[in-house]
Image: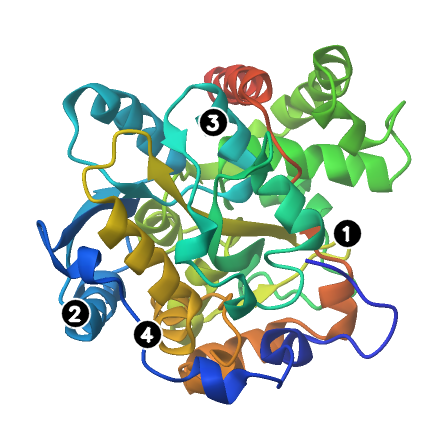
């Protein structure tokens, strides 16, 4: 996503250009080949979002005649492992990792490029298919991932016992020694949060972002973050890797503050929990669709990806994730509850401070996993 100098807000970003929206709202033109053959697409994606099966997939089938066979996985590490198996066994056409991970999928030979003549790049909001995001989605000149939804990872908090306010709420609150047994976190995200907090406090020898560029710098910086995080590991009441675990950390195990996806904050909003970006900036992510190298239903897969970029499909997809749409015109079709939640959580300053996860190559993911395991085992 590009950050503009002035006039930038979540709503203006989501609305994008008004030019062509009326045309984009027209019914999708689906290839005849997509409606032939099996008439299905095998999709592997995120568990914990019932709206996909209940609302989104039926709407896609009604619009195109293509049935979605859904394989739910708790996280993208699980998706990656399953995709490696599927490369041998088949049965998977499309998967939904995040954009920062696409390099690892490509370098492992798991995916093939999208045929952009079968999609419509103009469907996407400015900055989500071009600019930096376009570069991150492209490997060796080929578009390897097309966006489906974007969102954030910020602070979920108990309004009564852990009141936080924007401007003072900090990533450092996760590591406050007073919060023993109160924190819900994902292992690698909490280490990144520690690194970013130390960076903001001027306590790192190099910028935290430099650790994503080469292994030697990563080891130097992540060694520091790990050592500091271990000192306050007793703060953790539950680790999470997926949406269901994150919610359980608060509902079942008494978590009072956590670094979690916006969907967690949305789903807990009526149970006494708030959601606020830290002053250092919320982590921001882009999910997208990749096409398996051995996809059995390529035409249906392209129809699926194209529909998700159009106003109706994009709005339904984002609503299911309680996140943000990628398609022009989708914001006007979004659930009012989701729109209200985001508008309340993210003012213009919070939007400007979004910290987008950098590209993470296969070597980085492997090392990151080692650090996460060390943190959990400490």
Q: For mark 2, what is the residue?
A: 58
Q: Which comes before the other along the chain, label 4 or label 1?
A: 4
User: In the image, residue 83 lies at what x, y percent?
Assistant: 29, 28
Residue 371's label in the rendered image is: none
Q: Which comes before the other along the chain, label 2 or label 3?
A: 2
User: In the image, residue 328 lies at what x, y percent?
Assistant: 53, 75
Q: Alpha carbon of mark 3 to alpha carbon of mark 4: how far?
A: 29 Å
Residue found at x 65% / y 66%: 126
Please indicate whether residue 180 sits to the left or right of residue 165 in the image. left
User: In the image, residue 61 lies at what x, y percent?
Assistant: 16, 67
Q: For mark 1, what is the residue?
A: 280
Q: Which comes before the other along the chain, label 1 or label 2?
A: 2
Residue found at x 13% / y 53%: 40
Q: State whether residue 346 is above or below residue 198.
A: below
Q: Alpha carbon of mark 2 to alpha carbon of mark 3: how far?
A: 30 Å
For disc 2, the neighbor class at 10 Å (few under 14, some 14 to 19, many from 20) is some
The residue nearer to you, when weighing 265 against 301, is 301
Q: For mark 4, what is the residue?
A: 28
Q: For mark 3, what is the residue?
A: 106
């Amino acid at each position: 996503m590009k950050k503009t100098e002035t006039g930038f807000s979540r709503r203006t970003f989501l609305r994008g250009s008004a030019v062509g929206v009326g045309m984009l709202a027209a019914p999708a033109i689906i290839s005849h080949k997509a409606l032939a053959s099996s008439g299905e697409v095998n999709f592997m994606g995120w568990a914990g979002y019932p709206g996909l099966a209940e609302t989104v997939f039926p709407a896609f089938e009604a619009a195109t005649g293509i049935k979605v066979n859904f394989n739910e996985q708790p996280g993208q590490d699980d998706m990656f492992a399953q995709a490696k198996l599927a490369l041998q066994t088949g049965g998977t056409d499309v998967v939904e990792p995040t954009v920062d991970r696409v390099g690892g999928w490509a370098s492992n030979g798991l995916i093939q490029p999208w045929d952009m003549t079968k999609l419509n790049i103009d469907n996407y909001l400015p900055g989500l298919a071009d600019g930096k995001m376009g570069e991150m989605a492209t490997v060796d000149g080929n578009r390897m991932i097309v966006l489906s939804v974007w969102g954030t990872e910020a602070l979920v908090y108990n309004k009564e016992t852990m009141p936080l306010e924007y401007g003072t709420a900090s990533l450092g609150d996760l590591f406050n020694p007073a919060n023993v047994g109160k924190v819900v976190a994902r292992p690698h995200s909490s280490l990144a949060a520690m690194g970013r907090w130390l960076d903001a406090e001027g306590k790192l020898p190099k910028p935290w972002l430099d650790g994503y560029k080469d292994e030697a710098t990563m080891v130097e910086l992540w060694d520091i973050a790990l050592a500091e995080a271990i000192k306050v590991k007793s703060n953790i009441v539950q680790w999470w890797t997926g949406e269901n675990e994150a919610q359980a950390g608060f509902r079942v195990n008494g978590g009072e503050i956590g670094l979690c996806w916006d969907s967690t904050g949305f789903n807990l909003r009526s149970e006494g929990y708030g959601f606020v970006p830290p002053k250092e900036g919320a982590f921001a992510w882009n999910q997208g669709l990749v096409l398996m190298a051995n996809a059995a239903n390529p035409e249906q897969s392209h129809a699926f990806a194209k529909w998700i970029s159009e106003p109706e499909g994009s709005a339904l997809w984002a609503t299911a994730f309680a996140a943000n749409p990628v398609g022009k015109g989708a914001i006007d079709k979004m659930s009012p509850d989701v729109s209200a939640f985001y508008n309340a959580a993210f003012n213009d300053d919070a939007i400007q401070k979004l910290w987008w996860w950098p590209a993470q190559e296969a070597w980085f993911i492997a090392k990151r996993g080692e650090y996460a395991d060390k943190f959990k085992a400490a």
